Amino acid sequence: MRWPRDNRAAAPILLLIAANLLWAGQGVAVKLLVTGLSPLATALLPLYVATVLGLGLLSIRGAVAQQFQAAWRLRRGFFLAGIGGQLVAQVGMTLGVSWSTASNGAILSLLIPIFGAVIAVWLLRERLSLLRVGALVLGLAGVLLLSPLRRATGAGMQPHEFAGNLLIVTGCLGSAFYNVYSKRLLNQFSAPQILFFSYLSTTVFSLPILVALDRHCLGSLAHLTLTQWSAFGYLAVFFYGLSMILFLKALGSVDVVIASASLYLTPLFGIALAFSILGERLAPRALAGSAIVLLATAVLFRFDCAL
């Protein structure tokens, strides 16, 4: 039985909203955790835990050997998604923010929907209609109003900050590539399978690097506080795990361009969390930016959620 179009569209929209809400907490979690772990360990150790949890999920579903055999036949695709996508995204963003500033990270992350749209048109032959371009530009303008912009001329910027910004941009490119390439893998694998096998590829490649560069990272875990362990668990279970499964499931029903545009909701939810949990005050500029972001995503979801 076919569902009415509005009902069928509601499911992926709700999944995208939930994923962005979970992603909004990354900044707070990383800020808490980076005082106890190195930036590289902060980026990779929670991902390794998410990989182990993913193996448990696959084991519950059964036929683990057959799933590994199917993934092995597309091993190049999973290594490309894991290394060129997730590893570049997480290491680039985490190291970049540690060398630059969180404000620069928030602003430069606005490139992800733009990169995603361009890669989707090139790799998946998705259409880039005038409505989609307008929604992307409108969302970008709204989030710029939310972002804490600051002056940073080339003369006043430190070399490590410039290198950090380049790493952030590289991380954005890796994140956009992972989103697009995962859409192609969804033709043959489920969302949990894609997540696990791409994370497994990331783990196999990055673990020797982590051991070589931060051999005492496991020992640092013993000194984490309860709050930091909570942040670690949030990153492993909700950020790397549940949020990505929700996002990949939504990708099975909507184009990457639309899913990428929903990423503009992440800073909006971050502002809302800061207001509700931390009691931070909202400036009129932030309220205006929030309204613009909501308008852009609502227009795209309402008139161009092609299922």
Image (spheres, rainbow, N blue to C red):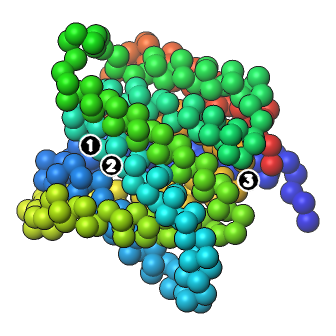
Residue of label 2: 91
Work out whether residue 20 can be spotted: no
Work out whether residue 75 can be spotted: yes
Compared to residue 303, the image places residue 134 above or below, namely above
Image-based side of 159 in relation to 253, left or right: left
Q: Earlier in the sequence, mark 2 or mark 3?
A: 2
Label 2 with label 1: CB-CB less than 8 Å: yes
| Residue depth check, mark 1 versus mark 3: number of the one nearer the observer | 1
Secondary element at tag 1: helix
- Between the residue at mark 2 and the residue at mark 1, the CA separation in whole angstroms equals 6 Å
- Between the residue at mark 2 and the residue at mark 3, the CA separation in whole angstroms equals 29 Å
Quadrant of the image occupied by residue 100: top left
| Residue depth check, mark 2 versus mark 3: number of the one nearer the observer | 2
Q: In the rendered structure, which amino acid carries the disc numbered 3?
A: Ser
Q: Which quadrant holds the N terminus?
A: bottom right
Residue shown at the point (17%, 52%) measured from the top left? 38
Residue of label 1: 95
Residue shown at the point (32%, 29%) measured from the top left? 165
**Coordinates of residue 143 in the picture (x, y in percent):** 49, 23
Residue shown at the point (34%, 20%) measured from the top left? 148
Q: In the rendered structure, which amino acid carries the disc numbered 2?
A: Val
Label 2 with label 3: CB-CB less than 8 Å: no
Tag 1: Cα neighbours inside 10 Å, few (<14), some, or many (≥20)?
many
- What label sits on residue 253 in the rendered view? 3
**Coordinates of residue 42 in the picture (x, y in percent):** 25, 54
